[in-house]
Amino acid sequence: MTMISKELALIVTVLTLGVGGTMALANSANEPSSSVLLSETKVLAEEETKPPIRRERADQFQELLNLSDEQMQQLSVIRQKYRPQMQKLKEQMQAESQQFSQMMQGNASENDLRRKHQEIVRLRQQMGNLRFESMLEMRKVLTTEQRQQLAQLLQQRRQRGWRNRSNLEEMP
């Protein structure tokens, strides 16, 4: 998968996740800048009831990609379709991670820790599978030109994000 394809996958995934999937995406080891992209792109498919600032950002994104109202609605429907499943997985991952943390601090056996870790890995894989399926559906909504424009926007934002991240990494 090329870098542009990964970025497209990430943006579409973010559209699907909304607020509910931020933890899973931000914890992705394969996409270190995912939290930066998440905050910038999750606004695209939000409902009309969102606060004015978020609505403005969604409108700007819609304008930048030249998305039609119909496309925005289609993306919103897809996101809403996957949101309950992703929310449930997010809650399960949070609970399992909290248990794991407590086990690490306590006297749990290595085997128990391995089992808990495997459960967390299994939940992350399920979340990844849902993100991928939603990405495929959302990809169908965008034109080839919109996908290219999106990849270009993501590259610009990724570069800004890495500059900011490198400053954080230099801190003690």
Image: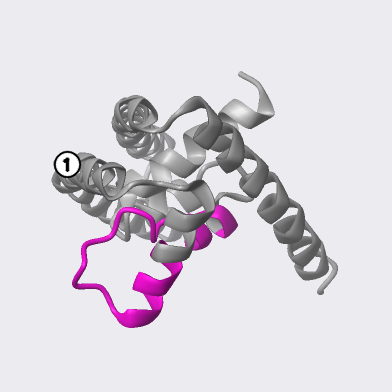
Tell which residue pokes out farthest to the bottom in this image. Answer: 52
Percent of width and height locating residue 128: 37, 32
Judge whether 48 appears above or below 29 on screen: below
In the picture, the quarter occupied by the N terminus is: top right
Judge whether 1 appears above or below 94 on screen: above
- Is 105 in front, or is 118? 118
Asked where in the image residue 98 lies, by quadrant, the reply is bottom left
Q: Is-magenta flag for residue 56?
A: yes
Q: Residue at x 30, y 32 (%)?
A: 134
Percent of width and height locating residue 40: 52, 61
Q: Residue at x 25, y 73 (%)?
A: 50
Residue topped by disc 1: 85
Judge whether 123 appears above or below 100 on screen: above
Which type of secondary structure does the marked residue at label 1 adopt?
A: helix
Q: Is residue 49 left or right of residue 128?
A: left
In the picture, the quarter occupied by the C terminus is: bottom right
Percent of width and height locating residue 153: 63, 48
Q: Is-magenta flag for residue 169?
A: no
- Is 13 in front, or is 56? 56
Asked where in the image residue 37 lies, by quadrant, the reply is bottom right
Percent of width and height locating residue 126: 29, 30
| Circle 1: residue type | Gln
Q: Residue at x 50, y 39 (%)?
A: 10
- Please indicate, yes or no, whether residue 85 appears anywhere in the rendered image: yes
The range drawn in magenta is 36-58
- Is 85 in front, or is 150? 150
Tell which residue pokes out farthest to the right in this image. Answer: 170
